[in-house]
Amino acid sequence: MYAILDIETTGGKYNEEGITEIAVYKYDGHKVVDQFISLINPERDIQPFVVNLTGINNNMLRNAPKFYEVAKRIVEITEDCILVAHNAQFDCRILCTEFNRLGFEFVRPSLCTVELAKDLIPGQESYSLGKLVRSLGIPVADRHRASGDALATVKLFQMLLDKDTGKSIIQQSIRLNPKLQLEPRHLDIIADLPSVTGVYYIHKADGDIIYIGKSKNIKQRINQHFTSTNHKSKKIQAQVTAVTYEETGSELVALLKESEEIKRIKPVFNRALRRTTFTHALYSFIDANNYINLKIDVADGRKKPITTFSNRQSGKSFITKAVEDYRLCQKLTGLYKTKTSCFNYDIKTCDGACIEKEAIDTYNKRVETLIEKYSYSNKNMVIIDQGRAIDERSAILIEKGVFKGLGFVNLNYQINNIEVLESIITPMQNNRDTQHIIQSHIRRNKRIKVITFN
């Protein structure tokens, strides 16, 4: 659990500043579950430059509560939380100074979004909150007011969690949170999980990830892990102390994240040789008569496939439907072995490419249309899919046929501006598995939105 905060002060000498406004958003890694926002009477004058910056003046604070009147609420909302702030050293120092004046020792672990952003989003011109969120397309209102800046920090932190592919933030949180050090009952773990699409991470007591999976219903899937009697499930049940998750909204994003992170983190209970998710592929070649032929064959890493399939039957089903949809020849797609005309020609659903009756260019053009649709080779495009909320979409970026990564966007501006999109996305590995996952999803989802760009 995180307490994401922002504090506005009077300015002045070091350690003599007073708090004029505070905003705290309690964040569980997915959504805000509690909040506290208040002006505070600092019992001292505000520096003129601060008034110009924030718009908060002495008259506004005359009837505001003093710090001691809100101190209990701040302790309660931040209890068992990691404090998160943009330039956390400043906010934590100010907060601790105020509590010290009351004779109370305020101790909380903290994370700084400036440091995290420099590590996870390198190469930005500036890491000040205003310039950073603007460059990432994150909307911000009431700049230099505690609530506006804290909400912008919530959105920035959510993006940083998405980009933290090594899961160091989550694992550190589990180590620092004393409640999760205790061995909880499995029912308690399941009770805190949602029935959403996403990727889940099973942790042992020191925070290390021992298993990664994806599901359309995380709660239900974890329940299956905890009730199964197979050897691997029993080992997981004995070691689990926490389950964290990333909601994706999109099954495609969940598949890509699962594939990437199993390879990257190599959890002990995931299959050791989970390398290839497909066995067959669709290839093309030009025959002696200059017709483009299609063929389903065993996947060969030395050849460039049009698209790939989990098994031969899946490939055969695809090519059978393609013959119908594109009026292709059974003989030239490997479905009907003959030295003469194919069966479809006899029933007038093939135009005769099998016996060189149909013009080569006419037939090949239809085959090229199919290849263009199901292969993203050399294409620049963004696949838009469901997000984690109604106003959010997931974006999968492909440049020159290479899968670059994925991210989540709220604004069309973020999708249409390629420079902003490249900053938002989490870079991911392009390999045969990711290509298969993306191509399979495009085949199965006819209404998927794809934006192409130059």
Image (cartoon, rainbow, N blue to C red):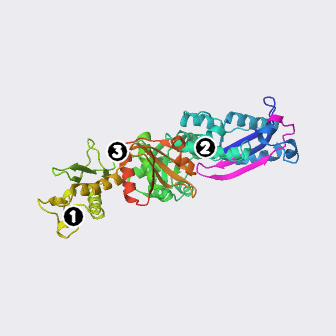
Residue 4 coordinates in the image, percent (x, y) = 66, 44
Which residue bears the numbered disc 3? 432
The local secondary structure at tag 3 comes to helix
The local secondary structure at tag 1 comes to loop
User: Residue 73 versus residue 276: which sits nearer the camera?
Assistant: 276
Query: Which comes before the other along the chain, label 1 or label 3?
Result: 1
* Residue found at the very far left of the displayed protein: 339
Q: Is residue 39 left or right of residue 320?
A: right
**Kind of residue at badge 2:** Leu
Quarter where residue 402 is shown? top left
Q: Nearer the viewer, mark 1 or mark 3?
A: 1
Residue 138 coordinates in the image, percent (x, y) = 61, 46
What segment carries the magenta color?
A: 23-49
Residue 246 coordinates in the image, percent (x, y) = 52, 50
Residue 345 visible in the displayed image: yes
User: Residue 321 versus residue 225: which sits nearer the camera?
Assistant: 321
**Kind of residue at badge 3:** Arg
What residue is drawn where x is 67% and y is 36%?
Answer: 88
